[in-house]
């Protein structure tokens, strides 16, 4: 009888310990991706919903970790200050500036003929 009680007590304690460990693993918050301390200045075109940035210099596609910062500039040319993310193709946007749109001026020498 004592052996049965002792065995059931051991099984009960082991079951509680494993359930506590599982609950701790489940409740752990996911770690944000590690960002580099260096900053990049990239000029490019913003993709759909601000999730991507296509570089003008080398046509490289960057995946944006915080697309909310680019959501209002979809399809426009921008210059961003960003930090690389954990993946080599990911960036986190720190600052956004719109590139000025160039237009022809009728007073330029090319139009004086």
Image: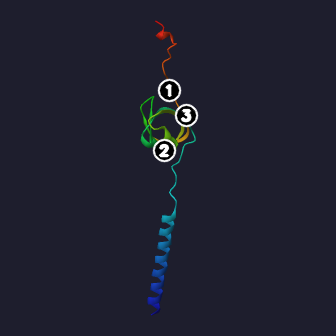
Q: Which residue is mark 1?
A: 101
The correct choice, above or below, for 55 with respect to 8 in the image is above
Q: CA distance from mark 1 to mark 3?
A: 12 Å
Q: Nearer the viewer, mark 1 or mark 3?
A: 1
Kindly identify which residue carries mark 3. Answer: 97
Q: Which residue is mark 2?
A: 67
Please determine whether, in this image, residue 19 is positioned above or below residue 6.
above
Q: Position of residue 86 (x, y in %)?
A: 49, 46
Q: Secondary structure at mark 3?
A: strand
Helix, strand or loop for disc 2: helix
Distance from disc 1 to disc 2, alpha carbons, whole Å, reads 23 Å
Q: Residues within 10 Å of mark 1 (few under 14, many from 20)?
A: few
Q: Position of residue 31 (x, y in %)?
A: 52, 55
Dot placed on the residue nearer the N-terminal end, 1 or 2: 2
Classify mark 3: residues with Cα within 10 Å, few (<14), some (14-19) or many (20+).
Answer: few
SS assignment at label 1: loop
Residue nearest the viewer, comparing 52 with 72: 72
Residue 24 in the image: above or below residue 47: below
Pick the quarter of the image with the N terminus.
bottom left
């Amino acid at each position: 009888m004592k052996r049965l009680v002792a065995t059931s007590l051991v099984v009960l304690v082991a079951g509680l310990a494993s359930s506590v460990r599982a609950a701790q693993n489940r409740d752990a918050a996911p770690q944000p991706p590690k960002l580099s301390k260096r900053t990049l200045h990239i000029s490019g075109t913003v993709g759909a919903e601000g999730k991507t940035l296509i570089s003008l210099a080398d046509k490289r596609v960057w995946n944006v970790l915080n697309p909310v910062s680019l959501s209002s500039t979809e399809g426009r040319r921008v210059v961003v200050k960003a930090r690389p993310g954990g993946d080599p193709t990911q960036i986190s946007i720190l600052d956004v500036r719109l590139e000025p749109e160039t237009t022809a001026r009728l007073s330029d020498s090319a139009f004086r003929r």
